[in-house]
Amino acid sequence: MDAPTRDLADFVIASPTSFHAAGEVARRLRAAGWAEQRADERWDAAPGGHFLVRGGAVLAWWVPEGAGAASAYRIVGAHTDSPGFKLKPNPQLRRFGWDQVGVEIYGGPLLASWTDRDLGLAGRVVDVEGNEALVRTGAIMRIPELAIHLDRSVNEQGLKLGRQAHTAPVIGLGERDLVSTLLDGSGLPGDPVGFDVYAYDTQPPAVVGDAGEYFASGRLDNLSSVHAGLTALLNHDQESGDHGPDVRVLAAFDHEEVGSGSATGASGALLEGVLRRTSGALGADGDQHEAMLARSFHVSSDAGHAVHPNYAERHDPANHPLLNGGPLLKINANQRYATDGPGAVRWARACHAAGVELQPFVSNNDIPCGSTIGPLTATRLGIDTVDVGVPLLSMHSVREFAGTRDLAGLAAALRAYLW
């Protein structure tokens, strides 16, 4: 791997859940000298970098010298969560001699892709005193697929998994206490009460192709955008003073895969509060804050679809994004993406300044597309927004597939937009 791809691989490995992703972003910001802001303390908008972590979400903002009521916000939005399986209460099951793990499906994973994978558990645990700890196991469980001898029609009819009956991983034969395994090394002083724990694939990312042109990894939707946004925010001479008065913001939300309706999701008040309090700390009153928002812009970055050569009929007949063809400009007439004409021009300028091509994405009329945080933040804040991202194959699989040039190109275009 080249250095940027290796750095993304390290970021993915460090981020098996949204909580870990937020923690890894915070770790990197601290290492770069950024100051952590607590939501329950007086707000700091001194020149320099600041960040706020809440659960699986993290917001970071750079305040330049000279920022004030005449400034605007340049925002990159992304999300830290990915589809998968979440641990249920009373998770340890005993069936037919096997110990299994009770899990609830989170979002819309490609269920079949999770079978016959070496899975671990990771997430957040909370004790009776409210102390929190991040936990992570190695490969301890597996969702075994039924042998073809017991389902001779599977290759003709396709694998059909019952969401309750067929997705419980096996973990052992009575020799493992799941809670003890999770808490091993957590350092929690009290008895655990709260669990936000998810399954994850333990296989590390890999570069594929003779020239290293492809990247196979879990959780590229949407750690690819979180990493690109963070890279763009940090990889600039922020002390040069030549970047103007605008406040640069990275907003990495949680819970996008389940609709964003949470305190740490894009439909919540988290970003709104950070912007309002930052404006106030810069001396902008309510009317001036609204004027700052009117001057602001938001790039919503989330992965999109590359054309699949084996299922080309599922895509638009005229727009065929390819891996390594450049970052996507995501367009939808029904506002599932927030892109409009002016937003498209602004993204095209950023890509041109970065020296990367862009590719339009639009869905087939017979197959409605998903949505992103873009329309949600545009609706809540009234900020002009464009939807972008890297093209993927196998989206929502346990192991997705991207182009290494697209990953680097997205970071470069976001940097050109921010700075």
Image: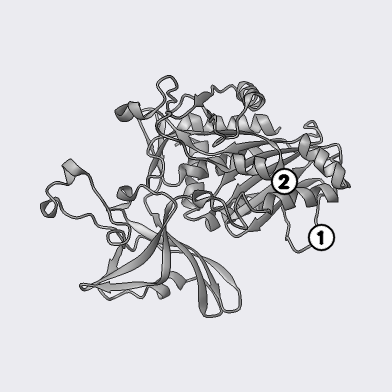
The residue shown at (47%, 24%) is 325
Badge 1 amino acid: Arg
Locate residue 188 relative to residue 207 in the image: left or right: right
User: Do the CB atoms of the residues marked 2 and 1 lie less than 8 Å apart?
Assistant: no
Instruction: Residue 74: tell me if it is visible.
Output: yes
Percent across and percent down for residue 315 are 39, 28
Q: Secondary structure at mark 2?
A: strand
Residue 177 in which image quadrant: bottom left
Percent across and percent down for residue 191 are 52, 80
Q: Is residue 266 above or below residue 403?
A: below
If the image is split into quadrants, where does the C terminus sit? top right
Q: Secondary structure at mark 1?
A: loop
Q: Nearer the viewer, residue 182 or 364?
A: 364
Q: Nearer the viewer, residue 419 or 290?
A: 290
If the image is split into quadrants, where does the N terminus sit? top left
Locate residue 284 relative to residue 254 in the image: left or right: right
Label placed on residue 42? 1
Q: Which residue is mark 2?
A: 61
The residue shown at (53%, 73%) is 187
Q: How far apart are the alpha carbons under marks 2 and 1?
A: 16 Å
Label placed on residue 185? none
Residue 297 in which image quadrant: top right
Locate residue 174 relative to residue 77 in the image: left or right: left
Color style of the picture: one colour
Percent across and percent down for residue 381 are 71, 43
Q: Nearer the viewer, residue 98 or 111?
A: 111
The residue shown at (35%, 72%) is 92
The residue shown at (34%, 63%) is 140
- Does label 2 or label 1 sit earlier along the sequence? 1
Badge 2 amino acid: Trp
Q: Is residue 4 above or below residue 49?
A: above
Instruction: Residue 34: tell me if it is visible.
Output: no
